[in-house]
Image (cartoon, rainbow, N blue to C red):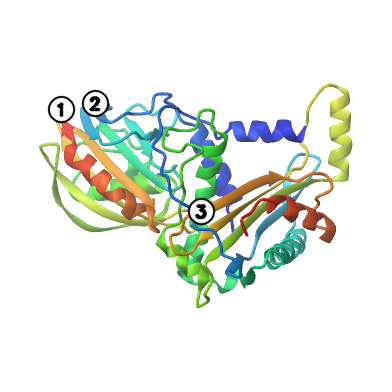
Amino acid sequence: MIARRTLLLSAFAIAGCASMRDPAPGAFRVGDGLSVQLDRVRSDFTPSGARKLRLLSQNGPTLDRLYLVGGLKPGEGLTNRPRGAGVYKSTSTAEYLHAFIVASVDALGFTAPALSNDRPAPFGGADGWRLDIATATGDGLAFSGTALYAQKGGRLSVILYLAATEHYFAAGLPSDEAIMASATLA
Amino acid sequence: MKHWIATLALACVTACASTTPPEAVAPRLPLPGAAIVIVEPDVNLALLAVNARTIAKPDWSATARDHIALHARNTVAARGRQALTLSRADASAQARQILLLHDALRVSMRTAETGDPAPPTMRRERAWTLGAGAKSLAADSTATHALIISCDGDFTSALRAVFVVGAAATGVLAPTGLTRASASLVDLESGAIVWKNSIVARPDQDVRTAEGAQAFVAALLNDAPL
């Protein structure tokens, strides 16, 4: 059943950690314009080469992931080489941006992400959208998620929290809700 | 050489730095006479071909799975606990999710153990859990704990062995096969991992043979609080 493939991919993902300075509690700036307040120390698993994205985790990226994305410009995405619907366009409609989130979660290595409960939500003083996500790893481990995004000045910022549905999503959600509530957009 | 390969592999999972939030949880260990669910071991063996490609060997895996399961049951019984079994095929949907979660957890536990330093939230001393859903591994039994064993191994083909020896003669280190296993003892009430261990097989611990598997399981469970 396991997952030699998953273990190897995870090892590469962990080895790909770019930052040797894990974020401490307090203000934390990401990319162009996004700032959040972290309530506790986090481990940084940001992939090498990422400039506007930080990947933080409490228990390791095979269990929980918090993606903070600040100020994407048109043509950029959550991965280094975004394709298709995973490419941000400044004129995007809510429908396109929902598809952008789905394509991005898929590009991050999850399967068949499905959105639900989309609703308007404030994001750092901007009018944003909040979405719930159901997806799974390639091996079938169910993940739950929630995303908050907003456009400001033609740039897109996203906070995306994904965690194993069993235990880890609920365990980490209050902390990540607090991070979403603390966000500011410059 | 195996140590060198293992060290190199483990180095791949080291990353990042800083401070730590230890989570102290008093482990609840199995009492004498307690029932322990032994989950069907997850065993994946392969042949390491001369060109370094691995070829899955389901027959080897099945044989080793039976050997490891037998010796795990015998170990639990010999220590005065009741050994129950859980076939992965018969596991409920939630139990299968818990086993997949354990696979994911193993990656983090390995990072915590081998990081130098480990990421700040994943220090060696921190507690790990599968959550309350771990109860699903007990099914309808009165088991208090579950033992989960995973084993992966590559066995060097004869041609590969010749190549490795030849390469070594010219000063080149070529990878050979390696068998690695891990075991976790899970408190089914809380989901807490109350004990864990991981080993690399010695040459006399070929899990494809009854004798080798017995020695392998003995080493893996040597200090388990069963």
Q: CA–CA distance between discs 1 and 3?
A: 44 Å
Determine whether the residue tagged by mark 3 lies in a helix, strand or loop: strand
Q: CA distance from mark 1 to mark 2?
A: 8 Å
- Relative image position of residue A65 (x, y in whole percent): 37, 43
Q: Earlier in the sequence, mark 1 or mark 2?
A: 2
Q: Which residue is mark 1?
A: A186
Secondary structure of residue under mark 1: loop
Q: Nearer the viewer, mark 2 or mark 3?
A: 3
Nearest the eye: A100 or B154:
B154
Q: Is residue A73 visible?
A: no
Q: Nearer the viewer, residue A138 or A146?
A: A146
Marks 1 and 2: same chain?
Answer: yes
Q: Amino acid at mark 2?
A: Asp
Q: Which mark is residue A32?
A: 2
Q: Which quadrant is the N terminus of chain A positioned in?
A: bottom right
SS state under label 2: loop
Task: Kindly indicate the quadrant of the structure image that contains residue B34.
Answer: bottom right
Report in which chain the residue with disc 2 lies: A
Q: Residues within 10 Å of mark 3 (few under 14, many from 20)?
A: many
User: Is disc 3 on the same chain as disc 1?
Assistant: no
**Hey, which residue is sitting farthest bottom in the picture?**
B140
**Mark 1 and mark 2 residues within 8 Å of each other at the beta carbon:** yes
**Residue B159 appears in the figure:** yes
Q: CA distance from mark 2 to mark 3?
A: 41 Å
Residue under pointer 3: B193
In the rendered view, does A32 fall on the left or right side of B37?
Answer: left
The answer for which chain carries disc 3 is B
